[in-house]
Image (cartoon, helix red, strand yellow):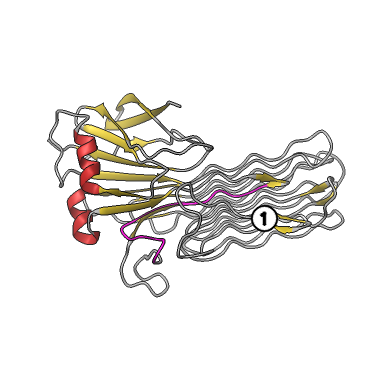
């Protein structure tokens, strides 16, 4: 399925150039092992990495980009890495005329390097793990983060220098997942999930947004509150429960570099959080996982909170409203991006051609000649 990827390159105050690039952006239900590159303007080539693979040789990546342009691209050509996290899922309707809250959008993380700088630091292979869209189960589940790394995260943990026990940085980007929407109920719509944070080129703190509280259209009821966003490696607090019978507060997001999307707790226990399109488990386990949205009764008229998004600190789970009371949305996860190792006069603004679905990773070569 082709989607138009719109790329804007700023040329100066009051002027810009917009060009459209058709990329084979993966849908939530399909994966590919084929890279898709295209020249978006002279000497600027953007490649969408395949979501069915989890690593790519950087020499082959440069060759794939070079095949799309007559402008010479070299190992020192600036390479903009842009990652998007998986979106949170919408909440269901637990009873009545109202709908579940919308899921939050996945976050963004972007840094500038080059093939030469990357290979000097890590070797030839770029590793990446694309966060999945959350699923709907009462409240929506949170989306998983998308990570780009210089090391294989199936065998070792990602590191950010001076965070935890890390002394060096092996991670390029951690683009957070969005929070899941809260469940609608008899008294109003569920709260919306929070968006994942945005981090660009060494920005230290990029918090996910707080999930929305459930909407009360009748009476003086207290709905389930939204979970707080993750930030700076710290998980966000869970949203408080509503005023209905069997209400329960959402759990906090987990600290650390991650992460899995937050699950939703039903009467049968927590369900699985969103993983990655190209891996089911990574070495860091549940670090940075989004918090759990809460729902404690098997009946159909209980407002569940949404799960938090995973990331550099998971978003908090939304609070369950309880019987006939709407649930809150999960918070978005925090995002992180490494400081630039190379410079480019004008960084292309790469938007997400798969917005509201699974995450994505784009690598854009910007010729300086």
Is 40 left or right of 265, judged from the image as shown? left
Is 125 or 365 nearer to us in this picture?
A: 125
Quadrant in which the C terminus is drawn: top left
At 25% from the left edge and 60% from the top edge, which residue is drawn? 122
Decide if residue 340 is in sight here. no
What residue is shown with label 1? 271
Q: Residue lying farthest bottom?
A: 165
Region rendered in magenta: 140-155
Label 1 secondary element:
loop
Is 167 left or right of 100, judged from the image as shown? left
Residue 64 location in percent, x, y?
23, 37
Q: Relative to 230, say whether 166 is above or below.
A: below
Residue 220 location in percent, x, y?
85, 47
Is 158 left or right of 30, judged from the image as shown? left
At 46% from the left edge and 60% from the top edge, which residue is drawn? 282
Decide if residue 223 is in sight here. yes
């Amino acid at each position: 399925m082709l989607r138009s990827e719109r790329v804007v390159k700023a040329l100066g105050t009051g002027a810009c150039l917009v060009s459209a690039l058709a990329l084979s952006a993966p849908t939530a239900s399909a994966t590919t092992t084929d890279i898709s590159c295209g020249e978006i303007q002279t000497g600027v080539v953007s490649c969408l990495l395949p979501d069915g693979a989890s690593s790519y040789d950087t020499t082959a990546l440069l060759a794939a980009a070079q095949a799309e342009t007559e402008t010479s691209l070299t190992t020192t050509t600036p390479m903009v890495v842009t990652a998007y996290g998986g979106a949170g899922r919408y909440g269901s309707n637990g009873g009545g005329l109202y709908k579940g809250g919308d899921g939050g959008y996945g976050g963004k993380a972007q840094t500038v390097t080059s093939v030469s700088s990357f290979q000097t630091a890590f070797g030839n292979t770029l590793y990446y793990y694309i966060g999945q869209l959350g699923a709907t189960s009462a409240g929506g589940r949170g989306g998983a983060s998308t990570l780009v790394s210089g090391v294989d995260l199936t065998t070792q943990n990602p590191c950010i220098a001076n965070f935890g026990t890390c002394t060096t940085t092996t991670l390029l980007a951690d683009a957070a997942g969005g929070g899941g929407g809260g469940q609608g109920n008899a008294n109003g719509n569920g709260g919306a999930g929070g968006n994942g944070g945005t981090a660009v080129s060494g920005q230290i703190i990029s918090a996910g947004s707080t999930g929305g509280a459930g909407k009360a259209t009748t009476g003086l009821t207290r709905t389930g509150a939204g979970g707080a966003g993750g930030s700076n490696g710290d998980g966000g607090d869970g949203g408080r429960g509503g005023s209905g019978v069997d209400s329960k507060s959402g759990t906090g997001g987990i600290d650390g570099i991650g992460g899995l999307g937050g699950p939703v707790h039903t009467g049968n226990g927590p369900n699985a959080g969103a993983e990655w399109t190209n891996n089911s488990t990574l070495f860091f386990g549940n670090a940075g996982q989004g918090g759990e949205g809460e729902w404690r009764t098997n009946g159909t008229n209980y407002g569940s909170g949404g799960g938090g998004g995973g990331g550099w600190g998971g978003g908090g789970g939304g609070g369950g409203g309880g019987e006939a009371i709407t649930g809150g949305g999960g918070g978005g996860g925090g995002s992180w991006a490494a400081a630039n190792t190379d410079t480019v006069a004008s960084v292309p603004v790469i938007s997400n051609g798969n917005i509201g679905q699974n995450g994505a990773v784009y690598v854009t070569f910007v010729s300086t000649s």
